Amino acid sequence: MTKNYLTEEKFAKLHEVIESHKDMQGPLMPILHEAQHIFGAIPLEVQKTISEKMNVPLAEIYGVVTFYSQFTLEPKGEFLISICLGTACYVRGAQQLIDKVVELTGVGVGKTSLDGKYSLEATRCIGACGLAPVLTVNEDVYGRLVVADIPGIIQKYNG
Amino acid sequence: MSNVSLSINGTQYEVPKELTVLEAARTVGIDIPTLCFLKDINEVGACRVCVVEVEGARALQASCVLPVREGMVINTNNNRVRKARKSTVELLLANHNRECTTCVRSKNCELQSVSEELGIRDIRYSGAKREGSFDDLSPSIIRDSSKCILCGRCVSACKNVQGIGILDFTNRGFETTVGPAFDMSMKDVPCIYCGQCMVVCPVGALSEKPSTQFVWDVLEDKTKHVIVQSAPAVRAALGEEFGYPIGTNVTGKLATALRKLGFDKVFDTNWAADVTIMEEGTELLGRIQNGGVLPMITSCSPGWVRYIEFQYPELLPHLSSCKSPQNMFGALAKSYYAEKHGIDPKDIVVVSVMPCTSKKSEIVRPELEVNGTRDVDISITTRELALMIKEARLEFDKLEEGTFDAFMGDYTGAGVIFGATGGVMEAALRTVADVLSGEDLENVDYVAVRGLEGIKEATVNIGGLDVKIAVAHNTTNAGILLDKIKSGEADYHFIEVMACPGGCVNGGGQPIQPANVRNVIDIRAERAKALYSEDASLSVRKSHKNPEIKKLYDEYLGKPNSHKAHELLHTHYVSREKFPL
């Protein structure tokens, strides 16, 4: 994903959010929530802005952002590929599915491709153990997979 | 103050109700091991080495953060407690880079000590190790997270004591690390290199960038004339590395040790501190008399200079233009000394021994060179000097009492006290008072600026002029003063700031005292005493009365703040971007 998601309009919004939270107690979490919502991520530039405006050390903000899983450092791609690594999926070969997806998309786990198309994440149990191993692409669910199914699935979204 | 009554290990005690269980136990002579705990700095109950059994509580309790209660029944020493402590430390060790024999903190490591004291002979756990990151790109600090035990002391020292917050916890669970945001290098963040993180680190995760081999190399190079200068605070702490009590002044042995290491000349930064007073005092008088920018703030502490450059660049005109004593010394060694002794400045190597890790970054500042030669070539810490003495197999305690070489080695009491918070202010007042009153004033003790209060303020009437002064140590306190200047609230004439708590005596390059010592001794106060008593013992206690300084001005510089003095002894500062990347 290029940095074009860091637009001036979004920063203007961020400034508004910071302004409106400035005097409340414990303002950092709500501001980070809003920032995640506005930008779809909380990258360095956004953290720097919050750090300067709120006079909170950058390391502290980075610490909070990396602690909570609802915050991300880079935006998710157009297609979010989530591969379940719950016990059932794992014993039925989910790791091999991940390896294949990484090979085909060039995206590491927890990362997003440079063109912003794919994000890949390994999730905990998504409650579809009967379909193990399972992966989802946005809202689409694919179950009982073997490695050979992966190229076909990726193909669908490449178009 | 009321008491509570409680039982520890079967004996009934009365203890003040404000205490924690850890303090209560230690008060009555029962020791409890700790690891993350550091009095006044890090009292967070993170590591769980200090656990005790409390009757009625299901789990073992961290005693360092557990307040005493009436009727408490505590056991600090039974199988359950011992086993829990052992397991905790074993788990830490299992995830620790155990290259102890080559570690910079070998034999002065709190993890090593606690492991030994708990009788750990085997580590029952093996498994994944957290991936470490190693950063030695800054001129001052090495961070090796493979040794970090996540105690949080450095985080507290940087964020709470210094008010900066370069280091913090990142990620969660097993992935947790301590470091700068985005795992940036210490060179790319607004770190002032004060080294307070190092002196509180219980292990070898944070250490100074070593320079001793560079010193050994130049000492063997016959084409080089190698001069050493030693800062005031070094003599107040070096002895600790050789078993002397904290606060022992080892000036004489220090001079002898340096000579035996092979330096061609053994000089003293105190001498340059006296020069600093001449220059800074004159600058202050000039600013007061000519309507210059006030308050003027001292510029001896390179950590402090970095702090204001990063955090308050708009206030840089308040900084004295004086170089630090270290660099004044270097500049004069390569000009005045070189000329008078017929040595080519290019052949002179100036080594400084400093209580400071930020000095390593100061010497490479591009503006601190004259005619293409660096003022100071190599800066080592007090700890590194101790290492060199050990490497040379010198028996420190048997060394005779030596003196510093003449020419740049004579100093006054004013120069000595530079190493303690308030010292530069007091030294400056001694000289400024004489100049303004035109007399040789007898009273030289300005006790209002001594001591460990965070911000000291006073108004001193000198020759009919009320001089308003303030002294701050540690950068949190400095920030408070700077905010006052910004808001126009402060009407001081002169402010002294030292980046480290207590001043240079507690600098980041000083011997590292473990928590069990720091819990009972204020090392800042003890080391400062060593300097104030040397000051009191000297017959000359005002910088302008130093005969070598008089000679320097008569024969070389002319007057303080002369054109030549400006060229050699003054500098400028830069506004720094906090996160350049």
Image (cartoon, rainbow, N blue to C red):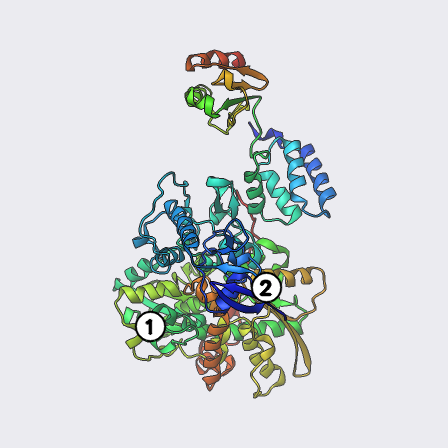
Mark 2 sits on what residue? B319
Marks 2 and 1 sit apart, C-alpha to C-alpha, by 32 Å
Image coordinates of residue B535 in percent, x first then y, are 48, 81
User: How many badges with numbers are in the image?
Assistant: 2
Question: Does label 1 lie on the same chain as label 2?
Answer: yes
Residue B556 lies, with reference to residue A140, above or below; the image says below
Q: Left or right of B490: which side holds B251?
A: left
- First along the sequence among labels 2 and 1: 1
Identity of the residue drawn at 47% across and 14% down: A144
Q: Which amino acid does label 1 sit on?
A: Lys
**Quadrant of image for the N terminus of chain B:** bottom right
Instruction: Inspect this view and state whether residue A14 appears.
Output: yes
Q: Where, by quadrant of the figure, is residue B35 drawn?
A: bottom left
State the SS at label 2.
loop
Identified at 60% across, 36% down, the residue is A42
Q: Kindly state the secondary structure of the residue where label 1 is placed.
A: strand
In the image, B225: left or right of A48?
Answer: left
Tell me the kind of residue under disc 2: Leu
Q: Are marks 2 and 1 in contact (CB under 8 Å)?
A: no
Q: Which chain carries label 1?
A: B
Residue at x 34%, y 47% (from the top left corner): B123
| Residue wearing tag 1 | B265
Task: Looking at the picture, tell me which residue is in the foreground, A105 or B362.
Answer: A105
Task: Chain letter for mark 2, please.
Answer: B
Which x, y percent locates residue B571? 52, 62
Alpha-carbon neighbours of circle 1 within 10 Å: few (<14), some, or many (≥20)?
Answer: many
Q: Where is residue B412 in the image (x, y as percent from the top left)?
A: 47, 80
Say whether residue B362 is visible: no
Asked if residue B530 is positioned above or below residue B39 in the image, the reply reads below
